[in-house]
Image (cartoon, rainbow, N blue to C red):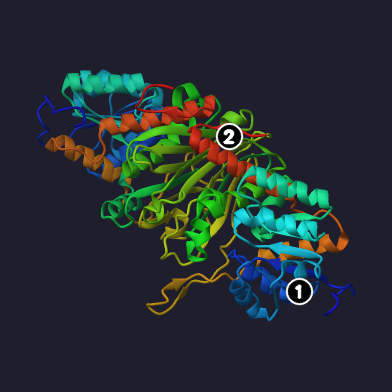
Amino acid sequence: MAVDEQGRAPVRIGILSAEHVHAPSYISLLAAMPGAHLVGVWDDDPQRAISAAEPVSTRVFDDVDDLLERVDGIVIASANSRHRRLVEIAAAAGVHVLCEKPLATTVGDARAIVDTCAGAGVRLMTAFPSRWNPAARALESAVRTGALGTPVFLEGVNTGTMPDVHAPWFVDPALAGGGAVTDHVVHLADLYRWILRSEAVEVYAVANRILQERFARVETGGFVSMRFANGVSATIDCSWSKPRSYPTWGGLSVQAIGTGGAFGIDAFRQRLAVYGTREAGISWPAWGPNADAGMLAEFLSAVREDREPAVTGLDGLRAVQIVDAAYRSIAAGAPVPLG
Amino acid sequence: MSGSSPARPRVNGPLRVGVVGTGFMGETHVAAWAAEGIRAVIHDVDSGRAATLVERYGARVAATRQELFGAVDVVDVCTPTHLHAEVAIAAARAGCHVICEKPMARTLADAEAMLTAARDAGVRLFVAHVVRFFPEYVAARAAVLNGAIGEPGVLRLTRASYRPRHPAGHWFFDHAKSGGIVLDLMVHDLDFARWIAGDVVAVHCRSAGVAFPGAGVDHAVAILTHRSGAISHVSASWGYAPPTFTTAFEIAGSHGLIEQSSTATAPVMPSLLAGAADGGTTALADTGLAGDPFRLELAEFAGAIRDGTDARISAEDGLEALRIALAADESARTGVVVRIGQEAG
């Protein structure tokens, strides 16, 4: 295994579960990163581990402890509700953790994950790659430098196709924790907290089950409105509103309004429009930078330098608290306080 | 049916139209009437403004409101919002049919009094929600009615522009007179949301103008729950730099999705060195080359008056749009969700 450009030994990384749709991206990026040594993949479904390891010819581990004793850090990409158990196993082995979002399906589990890692003395990072999306960074910069003046309102859209096409567990309330609200609120909620440097103090949300041919197991449509401690209001359209025929998975965009004007971003606008055969239809392959690479590089650096990552477990917990407040608001039909 | 059946005989021959109020929207309407071959009789408390329209559109000035009422079949009310009811009711009592610019009135009581006055006088009453005549909105409604996307479930409607450049002290910036951005700008999309997804039962709204009263930025978002279970996210902004005026909507249904954005569908993209636009006093949506929605709107109202038929929007629709807008304004001020059409609480 090669040393990196500074002559340092690579950080040894393993994958705990390839259940999540993002796992193949993490695996292929880590296999090619100079600072990383991808040691292997463990999954409670051996066949899934084999399939995930195959494209980069990394090792498949049948025993999770075998993998954990050979790595410095672990990437957990299981179904949402299984994060806590895998974090506890990794933390007990003294391995640093990068956990897929949302950190957990309940506030209790998210808090336990944060406490477990703190107690074991391992670093915990939540997988919010949007913080490394260049458009999102441009917006954060416009606010931080004062170009936007005082921000007063943020409107975000993180809509997509229903993710059951990737894995059925995404629409299983027990495994996923919920539907569109669980799946899509945390990215923008985290971006808003990061950009505003403020916490949500009140949440209002509505949801329904009309989209995706009246799919009824979990909510498929939803809006979340939140008020931050600094007075800024922000909304999120988290709906699975893209039909199967849509040319891409979905997208993430924000319109920020401030005393200095407005600033819009469309994080996945860098794409081609490709018109294929009748069967292939239309597709929009992305050609913009992969934010996952920046996120993984930050995890490697944090492990190597033994420091807090730029996105912490606490950030993951805060986002889960916003999702939890959204569900409480949906049940109450009214805004609910937070924090 | 709006305003009940006309007791006043249907209009034979060319329709005689009076426009009261010749500000920004009054001029827009006078121009549209002129394009329809109708030289409007106009009245404005500011005689200087009226004189300009005489020159530009061949309009004829009535010295008093009463003189105008006596000279026309239809009164087109384009006064500031808080004066709509007074003018509309006086016109109805004078036996004139009434077309009223949106929002219908400043208060529900005013709007209800307008309906009553029109009914009592046996004249027609229309509320000019021009978005129902913009071709992209019309096409979207047709697609929904044709079943292209199944049952509407999630709507996101956006209207973004810059702060109107009226002088300080102008009625437009006086919440008590105009109702602010929610009654003036957002009401367009509140009506459209109801046109697509039906009656609204709950309204939540947040407004930058309320949260940051000194910041001089108007931006508001309402979240509506329709009786059908559909939900709408309605955004209205005067927070952008001139000459921005963009509109967009997304209508997601049980079986499909409609997307529309004015920036993506503008058929003309000038980038001329001379006369680079910085926007006028108030931005007006542009449909490009598809025809003037104001003209289509007024022609439809004129036809409905002439033939005793319905238009695509009734006075009651105007009242319901106002009801939703007032609920949104209340929600923005109080922070609570305002329920419509059921017992309070």
Number of residues whose C-alpha sits closer than 10 Å to that of mark 2, classed few (under 14), some (14–19) or many (20 or more)? many
Say which residue label 1 marks.
A39
The residues bearing labels 1 and 2 have C-alpha atoms spaced at a distance of 51 Å
Residue at x-position 66% and y-position 50%:
A191
Foreground: A174 or B264?
A: A174
Q: Is residue B93 left or right of residue B248?
A: left
| Picture quadrant where residue B147 is located | bottom left
Image coordinates of residue A314 in percent, x first then y, are 73, 46
Q: Is residue B23 left or right of residue A10?
A: left
The local secondary structure at tag 2 comes to helix
Can I make out residue A194 in this image?
no
Quarter holding the C terminus of chain B is: top left
Say which residue label 2 marks.
B208
Tell me the tag on residue B148.
none
- In the rendered image, the residue lying farthest to the right is A7
Image coordinates of residue B120 in percent, x first then y, are 18, 18
Image coordinates of residue A59 in percent, x first then y, are 71, 78
Can I make out residue B175 in this image?
yes
| Picture quadrant where residue A24 is located | bottom right
Image coordinates of residue B333 in percent, x first then y, are 53, 25
Foreground: B160 or A107?
A: A107
Residue at x-position 45% and y-position 23%:
B177
Residue at x-position 30% and y-position 42%:
B32
Residue type at numbered disc 2: Ala
Chain letter of the residue carrying label 2: B
Vertical order, B258 against A57 (above or below): above
The local secondary structure at tag 1 comes to strand
Numbered marks: total? 2
